[in-house]
Image: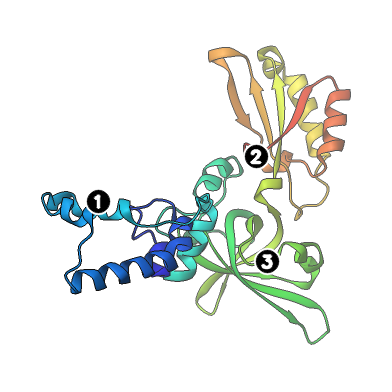
C-alpha cells in the first residue's frame, strides 16, 4: 500500500501523499469494519442514502472515511526521492529539471553525450550522485568512484587523489552538483574524470553592467578582458561565469564571456573590476 501511495497511484483521490501515509492504519481498520458490516447485511444511514445514487457512491464513501490530523504534503524533492526509492524511477518530475534549465549559462553537457566529447576537453554537467564508493590506493591515498545521473541517463565519475581532498565534503548520495572534468573511455564505457565540483545552490555568477558605448570601445573591451584573464590562475579549478548586461529596457542584451575569462575568487574579481570603474555585482545562479 505504501508503495502505491508513494508512486502517486492515489493522487486522483487524495493529492496529499503524506496524509495518506499517516491515515493508513485508521483507513485500513475502517475499511475492514465496513466490509464486515456489508457481509452481515448491516447498513448505516449513509449506505442507504447512497443506494439511490450508485454513481456517486465511491466519492461519498471516501468522504465518510476517517482521517488523522491534517499534515502538509511532502516537498517535491522528497516525493521524487521516495518514487525513485520505491519503484526505481521518477514519475512526477526529475529533480534536476529546473536546475538544468537555470544552469544553461554554464553550457553543461548531458551525460548521454559523453561519448561525443573530445579527449581532454574541459566540460561541465549538472548531476545528482546516486552512489559513492571511496577506496584507498596502494600508495595509501584516498580516491572515489561515483555513480551519477542527469535528466538523460547515468554515468560513472572518478575522483583521483589529487582532487579528492577538496571534493570529499561533497561526496554524498543525493547531492546535486555542477561538476567539471574530462570525458574518458574505459572498458568500452565513457566516464567523467572529475576535476572540480560545486553544490548547485552555491554556484554564483558575475554580472557586469556595460553601456553600449563601453561595449563598442575597443580599448575598454580589451582592458576588461585583460582584467578577467588575470582572475583565473588555476586551469582545472571551478570558475564563476561572467555575464555582461549591455544596455537597458527592451534593447538590453546579455552576453556570456568565454570560459577563459571566468573568475575563481568573486570577491577579488569584484574589487578589481570596481576599482577599474566597472559596475559589477555577484548573483546566485539559481533564483532564491
At 54% from the left edge and 57% from the top edge, which residue is drawn? 78
Task: Determine the CA span between mark 2 and mark 3.
Answer: 22 Å
Task: Please say if 135 is above or below 147.
Answer: below
> Label 1 crowding class (10 Å Cα cut-off): few <14, some 14-19, many 20+?
few
Q: Residue furthest bottom?
A: 138
Residue at which label 1 appears: 59
| Residue nearest the viewer, comparing 229 with 28 | 28
Query: In the visual, does 99 lie left or right of 224?
Result: left
Task: Determine the CA span between mark 1 and mark 2.
Answer: 46 Å
Q: Tell me whether circle 1 and circle 2 mark residues in contact (CB < 8 Å).
A: no
List x then y, in percent, for residue 239: 74, 46
SS category of the residue bearing label 3: loop
Q: What is the quadrant of residue 179 in the picture?
A: bottom right
N-terminal-most mark, 2 or 3: 3
At 58% from the left edge and 44% from the top edge, which residue is drawn? 103
Residue at which label 3 appears: 172
List x then y, in percent, for residue 279: 77, 21
SS category of the residue bearing label 2: loop
Instruction: Decide if residue 181 is in sight here.
Output: yes
> Label 2 crowding class (10 Å Cα cut-off): few <14, some 14-19, many 20+?
many
Q: What is the quadrant of residue 90 in the picture?
A: bottom left
N-terminal-most mark, 1 or 2: 1
N-terminal-most mark, 3 or 1: 1
Task: Please say if 59 is above or below 243.
Answer: below
SS category of the residue bearing label 1: helix
Quadrant of the image containing the N terminus? bottom left
Which of the numbered marks, if any, corresponds to residue 285? Answer: 2
Q: What is the quadrant of residue 5 in the picture?
A: bottom left
List x then y, in percent, for residue 177: 64, 55
| Residue nearest the viewer, comparing 87 with 52 | 52
List x then y, in percent, for residue 92: 41, 54
Amino acid at each position: 500500500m505504501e508503495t502505491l501511495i508513494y508512486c502517486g497511484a492515489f493522487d486522483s483521490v487524495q493529492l496529499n501523499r503524506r496524509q495518506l501515509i499517516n491515515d493508513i492504519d485508521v483507513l485500513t481498520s475502517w475499511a475492514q469494519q465496513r466490509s464486515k458490516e456489508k457481509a452481515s447485511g448491516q447498513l448505516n444511514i449513509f449506505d442507504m442514502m447512497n443506494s439511490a445514487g450508485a454513481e456517486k457512491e465511491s466519492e461519498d464513501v471516501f468522504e465518510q472515511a476517517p482521517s488523522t490530523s491534517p499534515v502538509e504534503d511532502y516537498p517535491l524533492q522528497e516525493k521524487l526521492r521516495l518514487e525513485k526509492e520505491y519503484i526505481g524511477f521518477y514519475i512526477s518530475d526529475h529533480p534536476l529539471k529546473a536546475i538544468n534549465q537555470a544552469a544553461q549559462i554554464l553550457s553543461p553537457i548531458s551525460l548521454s553525450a559523453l561519448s561525443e566529447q573530445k579527449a581532454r576537453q574541459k566540460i561541465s554537467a549538472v548531476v545528482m550522485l546516486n552512489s559513492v564508493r571511496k577506496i584507498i590506493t596502494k600508495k595509501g591515498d584516498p580516491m572515489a568512484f561515483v555513480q551519477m545521473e542527469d535528466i538523460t541517463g547515468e554515468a560513472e565519475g572518478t575522483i583521483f587523489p589529487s582532487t579528492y581532498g577538496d571534493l570529499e565534503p561533497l561526496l554524498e548520495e543525493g547531492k546535486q552538483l555542477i561538476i567539471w572534468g574530462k570525458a574518458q573511455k574505459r572498458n568500452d564505457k565513457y566516464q567523467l574524470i572529475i576535476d572540480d565540483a560545486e553544490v548547485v545552490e552555491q554556484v554564483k555568477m558575475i554580472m557586469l553592467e556595460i553601456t553600449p558605448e563601453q561595449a563598442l570601445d575597443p580599448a575598454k573591451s580589451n582592458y576588461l578582458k585583460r582584467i578577467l584573464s588575470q582572475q583565473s590562475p588555476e586551469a582545472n579549478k571551478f570558475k564563476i561565469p561572467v555575464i555582461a548586461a549591455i544596455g537597458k529596457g527592451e534593447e538590453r542584451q546579455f552576453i556570456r564571456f568565454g570560459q577563459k575569462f571566468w573568475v575563481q575568487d568573486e570577491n577579488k574579481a569584484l574589487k578589481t573590476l570596481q576599482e577599474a570603474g566597472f559596475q559589477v555585482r555577484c548573483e546566485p545562479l539559481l533564483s532564491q
